[in-house]
Amino acid sequence: MRYFIYLQYDGTSYHGWQTQPNCVTVQETIEQKLSLLTRRELFIVGAGRTDTGVHARLMVAHFDIDYEVDCEQLTFKLNGLLPSDIAILRIVPVTDDAHARFSALSRTYRYYITTRKSPFDHLYTMRTYRTLDVDLMNEAAARLFDYIDFTSFAKLHTDVKTNNCRIMHAHWDRTTDGLVFCIKADRFLRNMVRAIVGTLIDVGRGRLSVAQFCETIEKKNRCSAGDSVPASGLFLEDVEYPQEIFL
């Protein structure tokens, strides 16, 4: 049977989601505890990869097992074994062809910026010292809908077959002490959100015009875009799936 795991994690202490040699990752940590509880060598597949230091308010992964599990009990026991910076929200049965990555309809990220110094928020926000033109940043963000090839915001030398993505939402909102950027798409490239945010900040600082922002996308060259912002302010917020995959 196949099951979806809905979970949250603080990515501060992890080298991203995906298992890799000689590094502690979220995927590996969950797999170890899940295998211990089920007495099976289990592997999980995530809805996507998050980089070192990126957080998730909602990540989804799937695993296969040869017997029917008590989802509520497994959730409880798994939370008891996992470290405090990873939390399992729920485990649900899905159809055999449901896939945490390929069945996803969309993913939503948010990036948080603060204008004040705080000893409590620095692991989860980026602090800015300059006033940003939010209206101009939103004007540039709206132009993202005009494109599908986002090579300019993609990490180089990755194993993806295409850099095409369909962006459904991209907007900056003001908060009481800063800004939050929300972006939703059918898929994201590695480092894409952080590169987009960094380039939009260049627009907000007056370093780039909206026309130049568009030219940056059209060049399809990572070197033409702005710097990637720190991982600490980035959260995976939601992953959507078609209802028919759930049993």
Image (cartoon, rainbow, N blue to C red):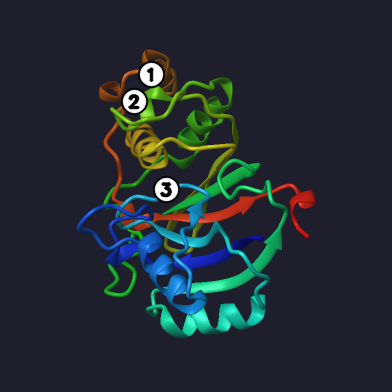
Position of 21 compared to 152: left or right? left
Within-10-Å neighbours for mark 2: few <14, some 14–19, many 20+: some
Q: Secondary structure at mark 1?
A: helix
Nearer to the camera, 124 or 11: 11
Cβ atoms at labels 2 and 1 below 8 Å apart? yes
Q: Residue at x 58, y 26 (%)?
A: 145
- Cα–Cα gap, marks 2 and 3: 30 Å
Nearer to the camera, 167 or 42: 42
Label placed on residue 212: 1
- Cα–Cα gap, marks 3 and 1: 30 Å
Q: Circle 2 sits on which residue?
A: 208
Position of 207 compared to 149: left or right? left
Q: Which is in the foreground here, disc 2 or disc 3?
A: 3
Within-10-Å neighbours for mark 1: few <14, some 14–19, many 20+: some
Q: Secondary structure at mark 2?
A: loop
Q: Circle 3 sits on which residue?
A: 49
| Residue 156 x/y as whole percent | 29, 28
Position of 163 compared to 240: left or right? left
Nearer to the camera, 243 or 193: 243
| Amino acid type, residue under disc 1 in the picture | Gln
Residue 19, quarter of picture = bottom left
Work out which quarter of the rendered image holds the N terminus and state it: bottom right
Q: Residue at x 49, y 80 (%)?
A: 79
| Amino acid type, residue under disc 3 in the picture | Arg
Camera sees residue 203: yes
Q: Secondary structure at mark 3?
A: loop
